[in-house]
């Protein structure tokens, strides 16, 4: 059955964003064009493929379907050939192409961009002593789409990776949220320079800053914040029998802190106090957990607006990391050679974005199954 013109045209538009991706293979020896390889891999992963073996089998079984979009004159590559191609592709160039494509996909600027890292646990190599790779991703909290990612060797290198990721993206007007690893002067300055704002978690890695904030807040809290300007907001949420009360306090007078630490763009301190009531087996066994977290921000907003921004950061855990593990089986992937783990992650992020944008109320897991069963639905995913 021939594809409708719209699906075919959209497939060409999608591939256009990757046409400048350098092909490392010798030009005269290329049997399988790179655009066909990328399209094959994306369609296969959308339909449930988790390895290069899966993709190769998909190609063999779905050749007629694939030819709705590209000629595939020589069929599709073997799994070994696919692995070699992905190992050789420049991961950073591939990620830059991804960023350009996803920017066209979203249509509107992201409001809150949550940046966080995730280790690909099975990407290590025992024989060569190679540590698993760590991917740092930028996630649009409202649209729930991956905006970009960069590869680092280990979690501690997130500090180096985050500025590289920010450089890839147009973030003007956005609010960037990062956990404590990214609470660094250079990162804060980079965000301000790109005309965006930040909310950065503050922990021990900024020792004296964290200590000064905690001492000041403790003193002000003791006298009812009589000596400073604050705003405060309280929310109560219930989930699975748990009740969590969050009190967000924003301290707006930070000139004293700015003079002492010269922190780029600093406009406020955010304190979030959480009280979780976790029911036990009986009425007298409820457990109470308390936690206080601090943030620095370049925003001049009241607590009722900053509280939701702080909470939206966790969308990257619940709507990305969890989905990549449970739906795309990220942690079970054994692809390990050279650039292949990072490049395959980029393909999975592309599939995640397209599955996420598909209309309807089906779960992501069911949408992926339907993509395997229904060629027309699979074609529609790359027409968005």
Image (spheres, helix red, strand yellow):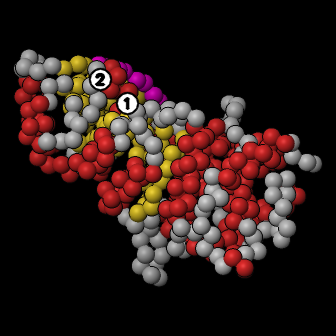
Q: Secondary structure at mark 1?
A: helix
Give the residue pinned by disc 2.
301
Q: Earlier in the sequence, mark 1 or mark 2?
A: 2
Q: What residue span does the magenta drawing correspond to?
A: 233-241
Q: Nearer the viewer, residue 247 or 261?
A: 261
Q: Secondary structure at mark 2?
A: loop
Please report the residue visible at 53 percent of the width from the left and 67 percent of the height from the top.
90
Taking the image as drawn, is residue 115 in sight? yes
Q: What type of secondary structure mainly makes up the magenta span? A: strand
The x, y position of residue 350, in whole percent, is 61, 50
The x, y position of residue 20, in whole percent, is 61, 60
Q: Nearer the viewer, residue 242 or 173?
A: 173
Position of residue 249 in the picture relative to residue 24 (left or right): left
Give the residue pinned by disc 1.
309
Is 235 magenta? The answer is yes
Task: Determine contact: label 1, label 2, CB under 8 Å.
Answer: yes
């Amino acid at each position: 059955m021939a594809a409708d013109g719209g699906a075919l045209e959209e497939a060409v538009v999608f591939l256009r964003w990757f046409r400048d991706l350098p092909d490392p293979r010798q030009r005269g020896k290329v049997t399988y064009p790179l655009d066909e390889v990328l399209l094959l891999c994306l369609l296969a992963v959308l339909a449930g493929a988790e390895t290069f073996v899966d993709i190769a089998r998909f190609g063999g079984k779905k050749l007629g379907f694939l030819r709705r979009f590209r000629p595939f004159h020589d069929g599709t590559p073997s799994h070994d050939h696919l692995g070699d191609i992905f190992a050789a592709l420049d991961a950073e160039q591939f990620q830059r192409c991804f960023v350009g494509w996803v920017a066209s996909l979203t249509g509107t600027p992201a409001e809150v961009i949550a940046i966080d890292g995730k280790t690909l646990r099975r990407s290590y190599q025992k024989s060569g002593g190679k540590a698993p790779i760590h991917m740092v991703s930028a996630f649009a909290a409202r649209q729930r789409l991956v905006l970009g990612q960069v590869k680092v060797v280990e979690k501690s290198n997130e500090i180096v990776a985050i500025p590289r990721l920010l450089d890839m993206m147009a973030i003007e007007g956005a609010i960037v949220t990062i956990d404590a690893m990214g609470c660094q002067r250079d990162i804060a300055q980079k965000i301000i320079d790109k005309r965006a704002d930040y909310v950065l978690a503050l922990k021990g890695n900024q020792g004296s800053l964290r200590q000064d904030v905690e001492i000041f807040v403790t003193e002000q809290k003791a006298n009812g914040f009589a000596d400073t300007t604050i705003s405060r907001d309280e929310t109560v949420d219930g989930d699975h029998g748990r009740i969590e009360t969050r009190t967000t306090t924003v301290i707006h007078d930070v000139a004293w802190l700015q003079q002492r630490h010269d922190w780029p763009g600093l406009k406020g301190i955010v304190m979030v106090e959480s009280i979780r009531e976790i029911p036990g087996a009986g009425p007298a066994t409820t457990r109470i957990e308390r936690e206080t977290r601090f943030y620095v921000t370049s925003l001049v907003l009241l607590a009722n607006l900053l509280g939701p921004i702080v909470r939206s950061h966790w969308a990257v855990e619940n709507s990305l990391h969890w989905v990549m593990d449970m739906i795309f089986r990220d942690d079970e992937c054994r692809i390990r050679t050279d650039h292949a783990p990072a490049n395959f992650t980029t393909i999975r992020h592309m599939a995640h974005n397209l599955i996420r944008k598909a209309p309807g109320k089906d779960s992501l897991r069911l949408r992926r199954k339907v993509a395997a069963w229904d060629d027309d639905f699979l074609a529609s995913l790359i027409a968005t």
